[in-house]
Image (cartoon, rainbow, N blue to C red):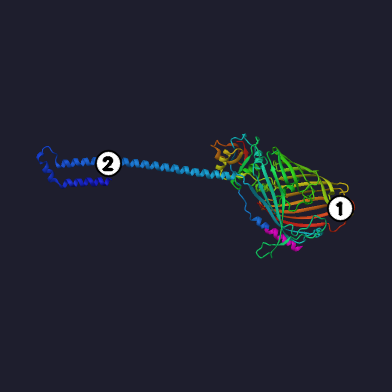
Amino acid sequence: MRARRIALAVGLACALALCPDSSSAQSAPSAATQPTTDERIEQLERALEAQRQASEAQRDELEARIQKIEEQAQASEARAAEAQAQSELDAVMASAEEEVLAEPLVRVYGFADVGLQRSWGPIAQLIPGGTTKTTFVLGNVNLYFDANPIPDWRFLTEVRFGLFPHGASERATQGASPTIDTTVSDDGSPNGGFTNIQWNGVLLERAHIDWTPRDELGLRAGWFLTPYGIWNVDHGTPTRIMVEAPLLITTEILPQRQLGLEAFGRFHALPWTMGYHLYVSNGRQPGQLDFSDQKAIGTRLWLETRRPFPMKFGLSGYTGRYERVEKTIGLRPGGAFSVTENESIAFTDYAAAVDASLDIGELRVRAEWVSRWKFFEDGKRTSYLPGTFDADQNTFGGYLLAAYRLPWYGLEPLAQAEIFRFSLPLGEYGLRPSAGLNIYFDPAVVLRFSYTYSRLFDLEGPARTLSFNYLHSLAARLSIAF
Amino acid sequence: MRELITSWIAIIGLLLVAAVVTPARALPSLDLAVIVNPATRVSHMSAVEMETMFTRAQTRWSDGTPIVPLNAPPGTEARIAFDRAVLRLNPDDVGRFWIDRRIRGLGLPPRQLAEPGSVMRVVEKLNGTISYVPESLVLHNGKVKVVARIRQGKVVPP
């Protein structure tokens, strides 16, 4: 624009300079009053200069306005971009928070362990299907399915997968029995079924529905672990301190699991917390069903604190009736069916248990004791040997375990002593001293070793001088929790 | 017997070597503010009260509102400082504590939020929440309620 104006002024000046004669001729008659050419040029130049300055001022004003508009537009765009970014950030944050706070429909977690073990000694040779050589073993592959579909309601099931029953021994009948072989053809295999497989087992460790509207009261229905002691609650390999379960667990002085209804809750009197379990169930039965309306009942009371150091004390009780019922279906004269139910075995259990656990610094101490009294009903006793009947029994078991976490490399040596009384042909009492070492690679990964010596003996009556009444067992388990 | 002892000693030796190479972890210390939703009817909390909530031993406030504890992720400076001051557990012990509870069927640990800004927003908006953030973040924030502070590894009143 400016260049055009300058060019116009220069052009006009040139035009005036090139035609002086014509202008002087025209102005000749009035030379006295008319301005001279130079004056006119000067006037024109002044006018041009004024015009140029006005144009430049106008141009500057326009440019300023454009610049202002452009700045406003940029500011507006920046504000819009900032608002969009904030909106996007809010959306991302909100979704992240929702994701964090929302409960998934089902959570899956669990643990697994594999190991190496060896048992030797006369008792090991007597165990049907057992080996006295070093063998690798698959221990537990346990998956938990934990669902909270609505607030206060929970379904928890724990499923154990294992290589059993292939190679296992039948235990439903007393005495030795051949091992189970589950080898079958894999009919779905591409080679037309020439592949052999061994089908394996699934064990329901627990499956129950919980309703917990308050800390003080919750209700549980289903297949639950009997709330008693330490081991039965600790339950899984990563949680247990010792590899081998005490005999009070394996011989089920109290049933490990029950089918029924349980109430539970806890009360706080800080730093202490008191809790209870109260259940009614089918109790100890040969199958799933209860053939009597006399339900088993049990309870557990516990007291716990974490100050000045973690400790917990428990007291448990159980009573229930066991019955084995055999049905005989016959045909009466006249064609009607007759059903006779014969209760061949029946007894009532009473059991009590106490337990204590202390974590004093790096020292962990666990102790529990379970006693059981079994009273048969007349004419309904079990028979271990032909022609004899079992007497009423008092069995018990208890152990004391101490483990110390060393400050080096996750090492935890431990020692345990167990005593039990259990009616066995090889001896009435048993002692099981053990020693072990745990190595914690990580809170979730631990390797446990243990050595246990078991010996049976008699305290009352004529002692059985049997030479095959002891057992050595060495075990290692690598476990992982996830 | 000699083969048995040799093989077991060899296995134990290998595993001890594996344990030796596990790295050690540093011990940070951070001053924290324990915050709750403004509607919560508490003005201050002791270490024991916070411990029962963050171990899920207590799951409801006194008025019946579900307690929603929010943890920082494991291994973060805030989490380590909080666990050490309130639960009196180091990171490995905390890990074992929750594995034990999970396997016993007693439930899962509190939810985790990594960003302190998100923690503040959730605690501000969601009834029943309790969490902790670096103390400097709540100096000029009146939207959450501070019920305790953790300074130099000790729980002190707000």
Left or right of B59: which side holds A387?
right
Q: Which residues are magenta?
A: B1-14
Q: Chain of mark 1?
A: A
> Is residue B132 in the magenta section?
no
Residue A422 visible, this angle: no
Residue found at the far front of this picture: A334
Where is mark 1, residue-wise?
A383
| Element carrying mark 1 | loop
**Label 2 packing within 10 angstroms: few (<14), some (14-19), many (20+):** some
Which of marks 2 and 1 precedes in the sequence? 2
Kindly identify which residue carries mark 2. A55
Q: Amino acid at mark 2?
A: Ser
Q: Residues within 10 Å of mark 1 (few under 14, many from 20)?
A: few
Q: How many marks?
A: 2
| Residue sitting at x 53%, y 45% | A92
Instruction: Residue B13: say if magenta.
Output: yes
Main secondary-structure element of the magenta-colored stretch: helix
Query: Which is closer to the viewer, label 1 or label 2?
Result: 1
The type of residue carrying mark 1 is Ser
Mark 1 and mark 2 on one chain: yes
Asked which secondary structure carries label 2, the reply is helix
B107 and A450: which one is in front? B107
Chain for numbered disc 2: A
